[in-house]
Image (spheres, rainbow, N blue to C red):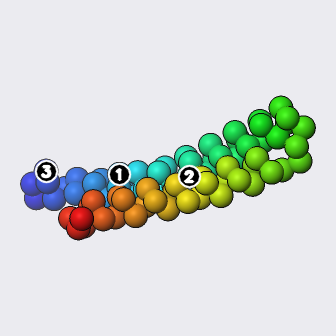
Amino acid sequence: MDKKDEFGWLKYVALVNYIGFSIAAPIMGGVLLGRYLDERFGTRFIFMFILTVLGVLTGFRNLFYITTKKSGKK
């Protein structure tokens, strides 16, 4: 068994980790920034809602970009 086959599964673990972080980071950033802005300006939840939706859309855009890049499509 050569080194490439022995550690090939790590490539897939890294890809799953990369995809998960690329989706979760914008969502968490939107929630945290939205909460901060809501507290700062005294609004109830409007900033958190808007920025969370933007974070979800950004996360799925990242997922689309990663999957099309990995599959070789343009």
Q: Is residue 60 in view?
A: yes
Q: Mark 3 falls on what kind of element?
A: helix
- Along the line of sight, the residue nearer the viewer: 60 or 3: 60
The residue that disc 2 covers is 24
In the rendered structure, the answer to whether residue 50 lies left or right of residue 22 reads: right
What kind of residue is marked 1?
Ala
Mark closer to the chain start, 1 or 2 = 1
Q: Residue at x 59, y 58 (%)?
A: 56
Which of the two residues, 55 or 5, is positioned nearer the viewer here? 55
* Secondary structure category for the residue under label 1: helix
Where residue 44 appears, as percent x and y from the top left, is: 89, 47
In whole angstroms, how far apart are the C-alphas of marks 3 and 1?
A: 17 Å
Residue beneath the point at 76% across and 47% down: 47
- Amino acid on which disc 3 is placed: Lys
Quarter assignment of residue 34: top right
Specify the quadrant that holds the N terminus. bottom left
**Circle 1 sits on which residue?**
14
Q: Residues within 10 Å of mark 1 (few under 14, many from 20)?
A: few
Does 10 sit left or right of 32 as displayed?
left
Question: Which numbered disc, 1 or 2, marks the residue closer to the eye?
Answer: 2
Q: Which mark is residue 36?
A: none
Q: Residue at x 49, y 62 (%)?
A: 60
Q: Would you call the spot at circle 3 few (<14 residues within 10 Å), some (14-19), or many (20 or more)?
A: few
Closer-to-camera residue (68/6)? 68
Image position, residue 21 (x, y; %): 49, 49
**13 relative to 30, above or below:** below
Point out the tag, 3 or 2, that comes first from the N-terminus. 3
Q: Which residue is mark 3?
A: 3
User: Are discs 3 and 1 less than 8 Å apart at CB?
Assistant: no
- Image location (x, y in percent) of residue 10: 30, 53
